[in-house]
Amino acid sequence: MSGLTGSVLMGSRNVVRFALLCKSAPARSFSVTSCRKQNEIGFIGLGNMGAHMARNLVKKNMKVTVFDLNEESVKSLVDSGASSASSAAEIAEKNKLIVTMLPSSPNVRNVYLGKNGILSTVQKDTLLLDSSTIDPAVSREIEKEAALLGAVYMDTPVSGGTVAARDGLLTFMVGGKKFDDAKKVLELMGKNIINCGPVGTGQAAKICNNMLLAVSMIGAAEAINLGLRLGIEPKLLTKIINMSSGRCWSTEIYNPCPGVIMGIPSSNNYQGGFGTELMAKDLGLAQTAATGSQTPTPMASLSHQLYRLMCNSGYAKKDFSSVFQFLQEMEAKQK
């Protein structure tokens, strides 16, 4: 069997499995497959993560309609086999299954609640899966508004970075009432689909994860930079760390030092990946949650300050692992 033939067959099997799962759902309960066009999905937000996620849906032979303000991103998906819409409202008008992947809480509120937003034309029984990382309170607000219109909103933030998004290996942290229905869709884009509880708990899990990620990335960058100053070659030090108790995702999978691991942002001048400004945003969400719950997070607070400083120093659009480069720049200025 050729690679192309195998790919087509696997894609077809996914669609058949998706359809069969829909068909078996009890008639009296909401199901993703209660939609008349069960293999059609609307996708809004084609950034570094969203573009990969939408492209994986296309590869699984789903009929995907996309919308993004960036025309080049839309064109790239259309070239891959998707169709396009002119607004979020048009997406909602044509699809009863919608995935959104947006940068921040204001973007999500605008796309869902704005004049030409999803809820302006949403159909009854539409399943809305929001994979953005936002304030849990915003997720709960949108859930209530969607419910008034007969739609189901769930928060489904992701972890794994652009490589996992590209390879369909994302982890989805799911908050909401229709986990089984959501899982059928999310499995087309990810490997681990975890039920966190009611709406907002998916966001809570994601915020905690990214808070830890920021702290560990800074620690990895500091350790490797110190090793350099002490005469240890980065690849060798990374090998030692990954055999020892300091091992973590930031050293093993997403190393911040250029040249240690190929195919990730640090070896591509920190282009692509997860932007520093987005990490600063997520740390802000964590600090807001920590303040509201009176939880001490001193390391996360320091990390937030450092990433905000990076944003004001020309690093906002670079991947958050560029903290390694930023530390080296600070070092050079001190000489």
Image (tube, rainbow, N blue to C red):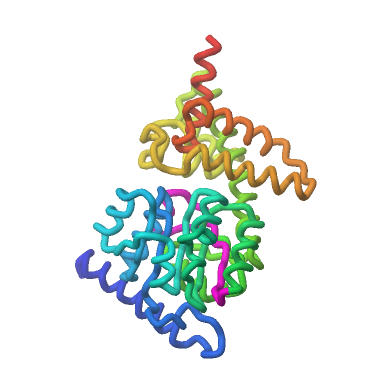
Which of 117/334 is in front? 117
What quarter of the picture does the N terminus occupy?
bottom left
In this rendered view, identify the residue nearer to me: 111 or 41: 111
Q: What residue is at 40 percent from the left and 41 percent from the top? A: 272
Q: Residue at x 53, y 9 (%)?
A: 335
Do we see residue 256 in this rendering? yes
Place of residue 98 in the rendered image (x, y in percent of width and height, measured from the top left): 45, 67
Residue 176 % position (x, y): 61, 69
Residue 18, percent from left and from top: 41, 78
Q: Is residue 214 left or right of residue 111?
A: right
Foreground pick, 310 / 91: 91
Residue 17 visible in the shown view:
no
In the foreground, 204 or 46: 46
Q: What is the span of residues highlighted in magenta in the rendered image?
A: 149-171
Outermost residue toward the top?
335
Instruction: Determine the residue positioned at 49% across, 42% down.
Output: 252
Q: In the rendering, at what x and y percent does residue 198 appear?
A: 66, 67
Image vertical order of residue 193 relative to residue 150, above or below: above
Which residue appears farthest toward the front when viewing the image? 115
With 76 as the anchor, is 233 left or right in this view? right
Q: Residue at x 47, y 49 (%)?
A: 161
Query: Which residue sits furthest bottom?
Result: 27
